[in-house]
Image (spheres, rainbow, N blue to C red):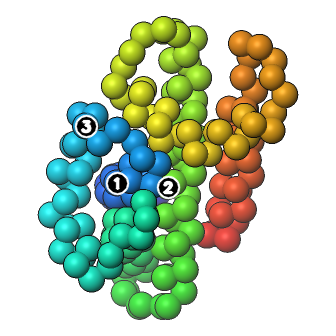
Amino acid sequence: MSSLNIVLGFVFDLACLIFLLRFLLQASGADFYNTISQAIVKATDSICKPLRLLIKPYANFDFASLLIAWLISVIGILVFQFLNSGTLVFIPFFLWLGVIKTLLVLTQFFKFTIIIIVIASFLAPSGYNPVLALLNQLLEPIMAPVRRVMPNLGPLDLSPMVVILAIILIEDMLSRSLF
């Protein structure tokens, strides 16, 4: 893989992630006044706002930002196809690959966020950090159902390991269908 592919992959994944975060912020009901939330809204508002006129949010789901994240993934796949083959052939299958790529970016975000939260809980268990607070709010919709099912082991919470294992299995299935 060339350096250009690595850089472009990072740029497309980051752009996709920013719009996915906008979707997750609203879906999870995260603190809107958090400085990170405000930065994400400002960074995405100029693109999401006009699209929201056509695609209205439903309940807590901002489908405009989800659609933009998917479009970024599709464009990224088309760019890589052009760079690797020298031709640009639009195949409708790329639309499906865009869904898979978007889901991969989302699962990677959740996996690394869980790892960050677990490490931070050991390093600074009682400190407040606005970034960690926001990450906890974004994780809560997927962690809470697992915590309800897992047996209570006192201060030891095994739910992050269960969720990471599930994410790894999902990533494996998605990766196999992508390549």
Q: Label 1: which residue? A: 22
What is the x, y in percent for residue 75? 35, 74
Q: Residues within 10 Å of mark 3 (few under 14, many from 20)?
A: few
**Which residue is at a point 77% across and 14% down the rendered structure image?**
154
* Earlier residue among tags 3 and 1: 1
Q: Label 2: which residue? A: 105
Q: Secondary structure at mark 1?
A: helix
How far apart are the two marked residues, 3 and 1, measured between alpha carbons? 13 Å
How far apart are the two marked residues, 2 and 3, measured between alpha carbons? 25 Å
Q: Residue furthest right?
A: 151
**Which residue is at a point 41% across and 91% down the rendered structure image?**
89
* Earlier residue among tags 2 and 3: 3
Quarter of the image with the C terminus is bottom right
What is the x, y in percent for residue 56? 32, 75
Please state which amino acid type lies under the numbered disc 3. Tyr
Where residue 23 sits, quadrant-wise, is: bottom left
Q: Is residue 168 above or below residue 64?
A: above
In this view, the mark in front (2 or 3):
3
Looking at the picture, tell me which residue is in the foreground, 34 or 36: 34
Q: Label 3: which residue? A: 33
Q: Secondary structure at mark 3?
A: loop
In this view, the mark in front (2 or 1):
1
